[in-house]
Image (cartoon, coloured by chain):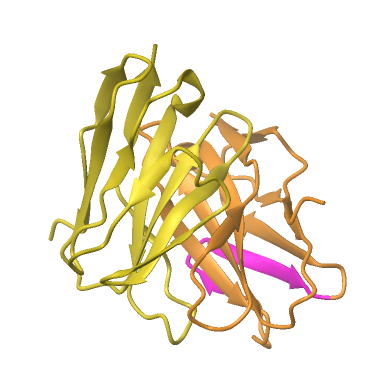
Chain colours: A yellow, B orange
Amino acid sequence: NAGVTQTPKFQVLKTGQSMTLQCAQDMNHEYMSWYRQDPGMGLRLIHYSVGAGITDQGEVPNGYNVSRSTTEDFPLRLLSAAPSQTSVYFCASSANRRTGTEKLFFGSGTQLSVL
Amino acid sequence: AQKITQTQPGMFVQEKEAVTLDCTYDTSDPSYGLFWYKQPSSGEMIFLIYQGSYDQQNATEGRYSLNFQKARKSANLVISASQLGDSAMYFCAMREGYFGNEKLTFGTGTRLTIIP
């Protein structure tokens, strides 16, 4: 009954470092996505995937890479961290692309600070 | 232009009173969906309610209902008989376009505080 699992929960990076935020879901969901949440700005879509092997950009993709080699996993990579990437990151998934009524299931979030 | 507008940054409501959180949206697509999520201080995002653009009736989920006024492009969340546990951030979000497009656009949120 894990749902969407994100790791780590907290991370501090220095400018220029790289890292990968992990996201895994055990619900066999087709759709997975990454959002970032900044104060006063709500959640903004970074990248999303409609199935294994398929990814696309969202509203704020610059500085981030994703891949979807399996249905379960959707890691988010920061290639060269910048202070502007300090944020809370959420991974989300949903089941049924064909109805459009399926809610997004969110992970618990990763709080990232870039110094 | 903002696609989702939540004009109330913060609200204070007495316990047991009903509360309405405002949300207006902007889209030219005839097919869309509207969502409300709750984010307590612990940080997780909790789905509350969904309204599709073609739904004839307003959505309800327990104490939550969505006052959907299509012509005015508003989708206000109504919480009846508020409880202390309702204190949280509330986000309105929209999916545009064809079924299966799960990209959501979020508003900036309303922080609701329930006063005992």
Dominant secondary structure, magenta: strand
Left or right of A35 in this view: A9: left
Region in magenta: B59-70
Percent position (x, y) of residue A61? 50, 47
Residue placed at 30% from the left, 18% from the top? A13
Q: Nearer the viewer, residue A5 or B41?
A: A5
Residue A23: in sight, yes or no?
Answer: yes
Left or right of A31 in this view: A5: left
Q: Is residue A16 above or below residue B24?
A: above
Residue A26: say if magenta.
no
Residue placed at 46% from the left, 28% from the top? A85
Q: Nearer the viewer, residue A77 or B89?
A: A77
Q: Nearer the viewer, residue A31 or A81?
A: A81
Q: Is residue A28 above or below residue A112?
A: below
Q: Quadrant of residue B29?
A: bottom right
Left or right of A70 in this view: B86: right
**The C terminus of chain A lies in which quarter of the figure?**
top left
Residue placed at 39% from the left, 39% from the top? A89
Percent position (x, y) of residue A57? 49, 57
Percent position (x, y) of residue A96? 37, 80
Residue placed at 65% from the left, 36% from the top? B13
Residue A108: in sight, yes or no?
Answer: no
